[in-house]
Amino acid sequence: MKTFKSFLILTVIFLYACSFDNKTGIWRDLAEEEVQSLTKKSKTKIFDKEIKNNNKSVQIDNKKKIINWKVDNYNNSNNIPNVTFNDEKVLTKLSTKLSKSRNKNDIFFFDEKIISYDHNGTIFVYSIDENKKVFEYNFYKKAFKSSKKNISLAVDNNTIFASDNFGYLYALDIKNQKIKWAKNFGIPFRSNLKVKNDILFLANQENVLYAIDINNGDKLWELSTNFKLLKSKFKNNIATSETNVIFLNTSGELYSINIISNKIEWVQNFSNSTSGGSNLFLSSPVIISNKNIIITTNDQLYQLDINTGNIILKLNIILDTKPLITNNNIIVLTPNKFLICINRSNGEIIWSKNFLKELVSMEKRFKIGKINGLYAVNSNIVLISKTGYLIKLNFNNGEIIEIVKFLQKSLGSNVLFANNKIFALDSQKKLFEYK
């Protein structure tokens, strides 16, 4: 009996150690194929019907030239606008290999500089004007040399803010090229970063939301929310409006907190909205648009009133990537590559297009691969693929206008738009400009 108890204790310790490592912040994330398997078990039928636009007007937002791209998904609302783009089809290599990282990097654009990092922990700044790397900094000592660093960045007021999977948060002065302050919170961070009113918002892997003074790194307040040990690839996600911080945690809880009073104004729980018998919550980044909040779950899309949290639109639909949100419409891509244009006011499908069928009908063979992003560019829909293709489509009906291979290699970073151009790292970490 004693032997059995010892075996049971050791088994529990082993299972716990395999699922969670607090030192490095490695949660037991489900592999991509496991997540896809859970999606396949969904009770929601994948949309597969083509619908023609019966002369319904699809209003497109005004075009906007982007100057800086300082946080993930461009701005604090996570909603990328209808961006301007030169479309001259000129590809320029700006640099040789910028990092040794084999993983996908996030890149940012500030004051004619590209800012990024590698998974050895080095943050670097590349000047477009000087055509060279002008600054790099590694915060980590020898004790962390062999450990992979998962870093999240945001840029504000000539300062790079960085959080990591060791619980460190630090501010790096771009002009003076030195650390302004650094703090260790003890628990790995697991979220994007947003800056609003001199406050930095981020969350750790235990779903605790922090408000940090950007001037000294002091904690202004924190909010502990529900968390689960088992997590998907989805990380805590944050967006901010003029008055509130919107926080979607990995348990499927959506919070609206007043930035001034620091009080919760409302909470919605979407943890039970997953189907197929899974408690695993999946989502794309929360989006704020026109006093509404748009979020996705495993197989549903919701639009909520930002002031009350009330659900004003619910669609049973499975998405393959982050939706494209305009003032009047929602554009989504399904796992079976149907592109759908939805009216935001009533949920009506204006048109839907079988994207794969459209490719075949053009009698061309493209190794498009996985779609990495969905954008509004020059009043067209643009899909960017992982293999470096740009697919331009008509906003009124989803028909393909053209397909361009804008990168010779696969993507090694996010794609960002700035100064009417596209910037990206390829899989070899070379920086390219496409205009």
Image (cartoon, rainbow, N blue to C red):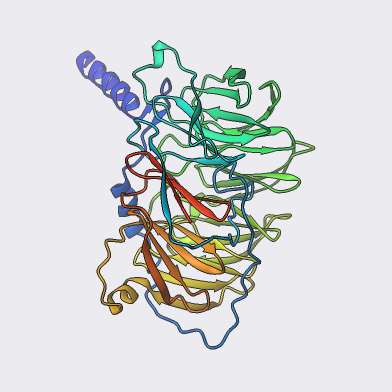
Q: Which quarter of the figure has residue 199?
A: top right
Residue 275: x percent and y percent?
A: 41, 57
User: Is 61 situated above or below 407?
Assistant: below
Whether residue 316 can be seen here: no
Closest to the observer, 86 or 344? 86
Q: Residue furthest bottom?
A: 54
Image quadrant of residue 7? top left
Q: Quick one: which residue is furthest to the front in this view?
A: 130
Q: Residue at x 36, y 53 (%)?
A: 407
Q: Is residue 395 visible?
A: yes
**Which of 34/162 is in front?**
162
Q: Position of residue 57 (x, y in %)?
A: 60, 81
Question: For the image shown, how many numbered marks are present on the structure?
Answer: 0
Q: Position of residue 319 (x, y in %)?
A: 43, 61
Q: Residue at x 60, y 41 (%)?
A: 70
- Residue 236 or residue 404, whichever sits in front: 404
Quadrant (top left, top right, bottom left, bottom right) of the N terminus: top left
User: Please, is residue 83 above or below residue 126 in the view?
Assistant: below
Residue at image position (56%, 56%) is 420
* 84 up-or-down from 111: above or below: below
Q: Is residue 358 left or right of residue 396?
A: left
Q: Nearer the viewer, residue 290 or 100?
A: 100
Q: In the image as oriented, which residue stretches furthest toward the right?
A: 261
Q: Quadrant of residue 149?
A: top left
Q: Position of residue 36 (x, y in %)?
A: 32, 53
